[in-house]
Image (spheres, rainbow, N blue to C red):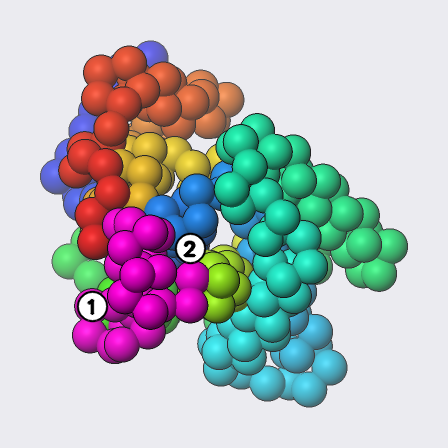
Amino acid sequence: MSVVVTPEMIGQVVISGILSGALYAMVALGLALIFGVMRVINIAHGPLLMLGAYVTFFLYSRTGMNPFLTVPLAMAALFVVGVLLQRTLVFRVVDAPELSSLLLTFGISIALVNVAQNLFTSDLRAVEYITGSWSVGGVALSKPRFIAFVFALAVTGAAFLFLKTTRLGKAIRATSQSREVALVCGIDVGRIHMLTFGLASALAAGGGALLAVIVAIQPEMGGVWTFKSFLVIVLGGAGNYPGALLGGLLLGLVEQLASLFLTTQLSEVVAYVLLVLVLLVRPTGLLGGRQT
C-alpha cells in the first residue's frame, strides 16, 4: 500500500524526531562520558534511567509534586547511586579488558532490575500529569514531549557548558584525552572517575524522570535505552561528546521516518540496521573518535 507523503507529514516527522532525539542525546551523553573517561562499557545505564523514572513516579504519586520539578531530585539521587557503584564495584574494572567491564555492568544491570521488580513489582506505572498537544502550523506538538524536550535541551546544554568552562569539567576532559598526562598535571584521576560515573548516572536519571511523564514505566524499561544510547554514541563517535547530540537527533529523525513508511514491527528493526551500517561504513562515527 503506497503512502502519500504531504508537507504536513514531513513536518510532523521532523518535529517528532527532534523532540525524541534531544532525550536520546541527553541520556547517551552520560554513556559517552563513562566510556570516554573510564573506557568502561556500562550496560547498567538503562536500569539507572529506570530508577530515575521511579523517583519521579513516587514523588509525584506520594506528594503531588510537579513531575518536571522532580528532575533535579532524581538526578541528585542517582548521582549518589552512581558514585556508590563506582567506588564499590566499577573502579575494579577501569584498567581491565573491556569484556570485564561489560560483564560487571551486565551483572549490575540484572541486580538493579531484580531489586526494582521486588520493590515496585512489574506493574506498569504512569505519571498522568499533562496530556494532549498544541497545533502549530498544521503540526501536532505533544505537550509532554515538548516540555521534556526543553528540559533535556537545558540539561544537555548545562552539561556541555560544565565540561567546557569549569575547572572540574576541564579535568574530566583532560582525563578523557590522556589519563597519564592528567596524573602528571596533578589531577586526581580516581576522583574524576567517581564524579564522572555519578554525573553519567544523573544524566540517565534525568532522562528517566522526563520519560516517566511520556510513557508508562516498569523495571525492564531500561534495556532498550541502553541499546539506543550505544547506538547514539556509535553514530556520533565513541567518546565524542558533541557527537552524542548529533547522534541522538539523527536517531530520532530516522525512527520517525521509519514509522511513516514502515509497519510498527519493521520500524523497530531500523535502529539495528542503522547500527550495522554505521559500523560497516564509518566505525569511528560521523564526527570521528574522542573529542575533548
Front position in the image: 134 or 82: 82
- Helix, strand or loop under label 1: helix
Provide the residue span drawn in magenta.
Answer: 162-189
Quarter where residue 159 is shown: bottom left
39 drawn magenta: no
187 drawn magenta: yes
Report whether residue 40 is seen.
Answer: yes
Quarter where residue 163 is shown: bottom left
Q: Is residue 32 above or below residue 130?
A: above
* Percent coordinates x, y for residue 124 in the rendering: 72, 53
* Percent coordinates x, y for residue 146 in the rendering: 33, 64
- Helix, strand or loop under label 2: helix
From mark 2 to mark 1, how far is it between C-alphas? 15 Å
User: Which SS type dominates the magenta stretch?
Assistant: helix
Q: Which residue appears at 58% of the width and 66% of the height? A: 83
Q: Is residue 107 left or right of residue 33?
A: right
* Percent coordinates x, y for residue 82 in the rendering: 59, 63
Per the rendering, the mark at residue 264 is none
Q: Amino acid type of disc 2?
A: Gly
Q: Is residue 156 above or below residue 6?
A: below
Front position in the image: 235 or 240: 240
Q: Is residue 10 left or right of residue 51?
A: left
- Reading the image, the residue beneath label 2 is 30
Q: Which residue appears at 46% of the width and 27% of the height? A: 268
Q: How many marks?
A: 2
Whether tag 2 and tag 1 are in contact, CB under 8 A, the answer is no
Q: Which residue appears at 69% of the width and 86% of the height? A: 63
- Reading the image, the residue beneath label 1 is 164
Report whether residue 134 is seen.
Answer: no
* Percent coordinates x, y for residue 129 in the rendering: 55, 73
Q: Amino acid type of disc 1?
A: Lys
